[in-house]
Amino acid sequence: MIAKILPIDQLLSALSAERGAGKRIVFTNGCFDLMHIGHTRYLQAAKDLGDVLVVGVNSDASVRSLDKAPDRPIVPEAQRAEVLAALGCVDHVVIFNESDPLRLITSVQPDVLVKGGDWAIDRIVGRDIVEARGGVVKTIPLVPGLSTTGLLQRIRSAAK
C-alpha cells in the first residue's frame, strides 16, 4: 500500500511507463478527511473511466488554507494517503501542498480529470490544460446527504 504513495518525481516516472503501455490516466484530488462510502464509490467510478487512477491528496497545510473548519483535517495527511492507497481502485497517491491542484495536474497531464458532481465543469481547476491535450473532464454524482462536514456535524451534536 505504502508503495502507492509517491513523491511527484517517482509518480511522473511511473506514469510515463504506464502511458507508454497505452494506459489511460485518470486524475482526481481532494482532502479525503474521514473517509466514507461516498468517497469509495466516487473513487471506484473515477477508476472506471480509465486504467490508472491517480489521487492527489491535499496536505494538512493545504486543507487548513481552504475554507474548512479550523480543526480540519481531523486525520493527518500520511494516514489519509495510506487509507486511499489501501483501496484497490487507487493506483497512485500523491500529497500536494498548494491550495489547488493546478501545478500537479499540469505535471501529471491526465487523460481524464474527475471531480465530484458538486463542481460545475467550467469551474474545475485544470480543465483547460486537460482539454487542450485532447483529454476529457468529467463529474461524478455525489452520494446524497453524505459528506465529511455532515459527519462531523453529527458527531459533534452527539457529543453534546
Image: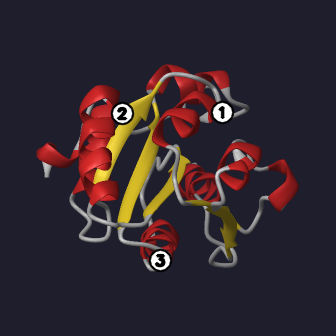
Give the alpha-carbon distance from disc 2 to disc 3, as whole Å.
21 Å
Q: Amino acid at mark 2?
A: Glu
Q: Quadrant of residue 95?
A: top left
**Would residue 72 be found to the left or right of residue 65 on screen?**
left
Name the foreground residue: 159 vs 59: 59
Ranked by sequence position, the earlier of labels 2 and 1 is: 1
Ranked by sequence position, the earlier of labels 2 and 3 is: 3
Instruction: State the residue at coordinates (69%, 43%).
Output: 129
What secondary structure is found at the residue carrying circle 3? helix
Q: Amino acid at mark 1?
A: Ala
The answer to whether one can see residue 80 in this image is no
Q: Which residue is mark 2?
A: 77
- In the rendered view, would you say 89 is above or below 152? below
Q: Which residue is mark 3?
A: 41
**Would residue 51 be found to the left or right of residue 153 on screen?**
left
Look at the numbered discs 2 and 1 and tell me whether their residues touch, using CB distance below 8 Å: no
The answer to whether one can see residue 130 in this image is yes
Give the alpha-carbon distance from disc 2 to disc 1, as whole Å.
16 Å
Look at the numbered discs 1 and 3 and tell me whether their residues touch, using CB distance below 8 Å: no
Tell which tag, 2 or 1, sits nearer the viewer: 2
Q: Position of residue 116 (x, y in %)?
A: 66, 64
Give the alpha-carbon distance from disc 1 to disc 3, as whole Å.
25 Å
Instruction: State the residue at coordinates (62%, 78%).
Output: 143
Instruction: State the residue at coordinates (34%, 67%).
Output: 22
Q: Residues within 10 Å of mark 2 (few under 14, many from 20)?
A: many
Q: Which residue is mark 1?
A: 69
Ranked by sequence position, the earlier of labels 1 and 3 is: 3
Q: Residues within 10 Å of mark 3 (few under 14, many from 20)?
A: some
